[in-house]
């Protein structure tokens, strides 16, 4: 009896590491110390000393059951972008710059090419957010997970000078809400998505082309979560103060927008102020999902909401466009009970 007969292939693990090295190298920053394969990732904090009062920000998340679609479609090179996005977007909306990322892959069986594909996506997410991929873990769980299954999660650390943190404390009535377009469903609500499209949850069903989507169903649903790090950096570089910011993740508008507000102010969002991607009305109709539940589960086409002074709106939107994002004025801040009104 040996470890391989028990279901864990150490040699496959070594092969996975070799295959992923080329992807990891692309994410390196000058602060990274040492190479891949150490017991821990090392990152120099020399540059942070230049800040008046540096604050470390951290985020950890996964991709939820979106991973199941990647498994069904046998397409694994983008799900890693989602894992990175879910962490670094949270750091960015607090005013932070992501520094480094670590991933954790649990699998029923280590297929080296598949693991390398997953890490390829993680590396791409790190490149998009300018974070270094400094470590990770791939764990085989025979008997706990089916051989073809895996789960993916990650952890990011960022930094911000305390004076630049986005806290919402200076929000006032009349401030304007700008929403940045999402790429689709992103990485939340997929248990409901899978229930709505229960009959389509096969490789053939997800490969079906829909005219209203302009793409196959699986391609639309698997589209990677948009990373907004560069857009928010561009806004800061343009000299615009972001007063408050919300990453629209699980809980949609109703749970996430209030998190950016201080007491005494309310966000008022116009639902018709931007185009809603066709996947959302398609799901609402097919699944007979009430509108409020849609806005309480999904991003409905807006992945990040930013509050700025009215005088800074055009400058902020131009900065977002320069980073490749599509912004819309979607509402305002009003005096009132803390919360959000969708009208």
Image: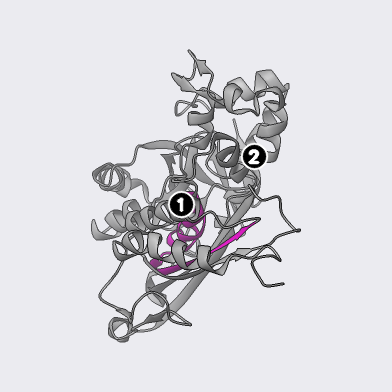
Q: Is residue 259 visible?
A: yes
What secondary structure is found at the residue carrying circle 2? helix
Q: Nearer the viewer, residue 2 or 340?
A: 2
Q: CA distance from mark 1 to mark 2?
A: 26 Å
Any magenta on residue 309? no
User: Residue drawn 69% across and 65% down?
Assistant: 5
Question: Seen in the image, is 141 located left or right of residue 31?
Answer: right
Q: Quadrant of the N terminus?
A: bottom right
Residue tagged 2: 190
Earlier residue among tags 1 and 2: 1
Q: Quadrant of residue 32?
A: bottom left
Q: Nearer the viewer, residue 333 or 35?
A: 35
Residue 189, placed above or below residue 110: above
Residue tagged 1: 113
User: x, y percentage for residue 169?
Assistant: 50, 64
User: Residue drawn 32% across and 57% down?
Assistant: 127
Q: Is residue 155 visible?
A: no
User: x, y percentage for residue 191?
Assistant: 70, 39
Residue 140, placed above or below residue 203: below
Q: Quadrant of the C terminus?
A: top right
User: Residue drawn 52% across and 62% down?
Assistant: 12
Q: Quadrant of residue 197?
A: top right
Counting other residues with Cα less than 10 Å from the Cα at mark 1, is it few (<14), some (14-19), or many (20 or more)?
some
Which residue lies most toward the right here? 143
User: Residue drawn 39% across and 35% down?
Assistant: 328
Magenta residue span: 81-107
What secondary structure is found at the residue carrying circle 1? helix
How many tags in the picture? Answer: 2
Q: Which callout, 1 or 2, points to the residue nearer the camera? A: 1
């Amino acid at each position: 009896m040996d470890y391989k007969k028990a279901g864990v292939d150490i040699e496959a693990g070594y092969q996975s590491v070799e295959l992923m090295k080329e992807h990891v190298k692309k994410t390196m920053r000058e602060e990274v110390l040492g190479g891949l394969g150490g017991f821990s990732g090392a990152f120099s904090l020399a540059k942070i000393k230049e800040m008046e009062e540096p604050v470390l920000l951290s985020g950890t998340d996964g991709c939820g059951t979106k991973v199941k679609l990647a498994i069904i479609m046998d397409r694994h090179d983008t799900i890693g972008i989602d894992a990175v996005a879910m962490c670094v977007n949270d750091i960015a909306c607090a005013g932070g710059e992501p520094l480094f990322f670590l991933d954790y892959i649990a699998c029923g069986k280590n297929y080296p090419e598949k693991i390398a594909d997953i890490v390829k996506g993680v590396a791409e997410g790190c490149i998009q957010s300018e974070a270094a991929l400094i470590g990770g873990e791939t764990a085989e769980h025979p008997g706990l997970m089916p051989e073809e299954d895996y789960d993916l999660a990650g952890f990011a650390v960022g930094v911000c000078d305390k004076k630049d943190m986005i806290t919402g404390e200076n929000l006032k009535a009349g401030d304007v809400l700008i929403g940045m377009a999402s790429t689709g469903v992103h990485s939340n609500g997929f248990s409901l998505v899978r229930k709505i499209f229960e009959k389509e949850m096969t490789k053939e069903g997800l490969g079906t082309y829909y005219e209203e989507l302009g793409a196959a169903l699986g391609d639309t649903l698997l589209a990677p979560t948009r990373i907004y790090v560069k857009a928010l950096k561009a806004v800061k570089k343009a000299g615009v103060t972001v007063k408050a910011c919300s990453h629209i993740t699980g809980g949609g508008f109703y749970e996430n927008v209030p998190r950016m507000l201080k007491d005494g102010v309310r966000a008022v969002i116009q639902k018709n102020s931007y185009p809603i991607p066709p996947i959302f009305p398609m799901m609402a109709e097919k699944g007979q999902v009430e509108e409020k539940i849609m806005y309480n589960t999904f991003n409905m086409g807006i992945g990040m909401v930013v509050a700025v002074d009215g005088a800074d709106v055009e400058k902020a939107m131009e900065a977002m466009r320069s980073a490749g994002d599509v912004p819309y004025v979607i509402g305002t801040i009003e005096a009132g009970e803390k919360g959000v009104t969708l009208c």
